[in-house]
Amino acid sequence: MSITSGLVLFSVIWFLTFLVVIPIRLQTQGDLGKIEPGTHAGAPEHHHLKKKAWITTAISFVLWIVIVGIILSGWITIRDFDWLGRMD
């Protein structure tokens, strides 16, 4: 695995994890009963994005280490996904 592949893998894992972490403990204006005129009730009141970004980075790093370890060790190879028998 090259450096570029590792960075791309980390980026994909980070963004997928971030999309999962964003709605956790999100407080909307509708939940708090403080709806500002002209905004949707589902608009976030307290989003804590900086904290969630750090949590996402920690989780992503652990997942990345596990996935890179699996790839580099050879436990799972591209040939494991050759269900039609096209590879030698």
Image: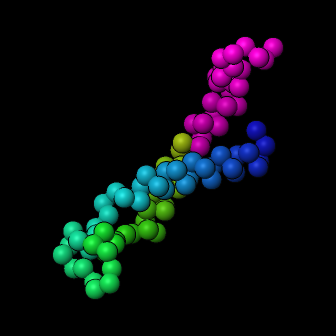
Position of residue 68 in the picture relative to residue 30 (left or right): right
At horizontal 49% and vertical 51% (from top left) the residue drawn is: 17
Residue 82 shows in this picture: yes
On screen, residue 86 above or below 65: above
In this view, the residue in front, 70 or 42, is: 42
Where is residue 71? Give x, y as percent.
67, 31
Looking at this view, name the residue that lies furthest to the bottom.
Answer: 37
On screen, residue 2 above or below 33: above
Name the image quarter holding the C terminus: top right
Labels in figure, total: 0
Position of residue 85 in the picture relative to residue 63 (left or right): right
Position of residue 87 in the picture relative to residue 38 (left or right): right
Where is residue 18? Give x, y as percent.
48, 56
Residue 26 painted magenta: no
Name the image quarter holding the N terminus: top right
At horizontal 69% and vertical 51% (from top left) the residue drawn is: 7
Where is residue 24? Give x, y as percent.
34, 57
On screen, residue 47 above or below 62: below
Colouring mode (rainbow / by chain / secondary structure / one colour): rainbow
On screen, residue 83 above or below 27: above
At horizontal 56% and vertical 53% (from top left) the residue drawn is: 14
Magenta-drawn segment = 64-88
Residue 58 shows in this picture: no
In this view, the residue in front, 73 or 76, is: 76
Looking at this view, name the residue that lies furthest to the right.
Answer: 88
At horizontal 78% and vertical 43% (from top left) the residue drawn is: 2
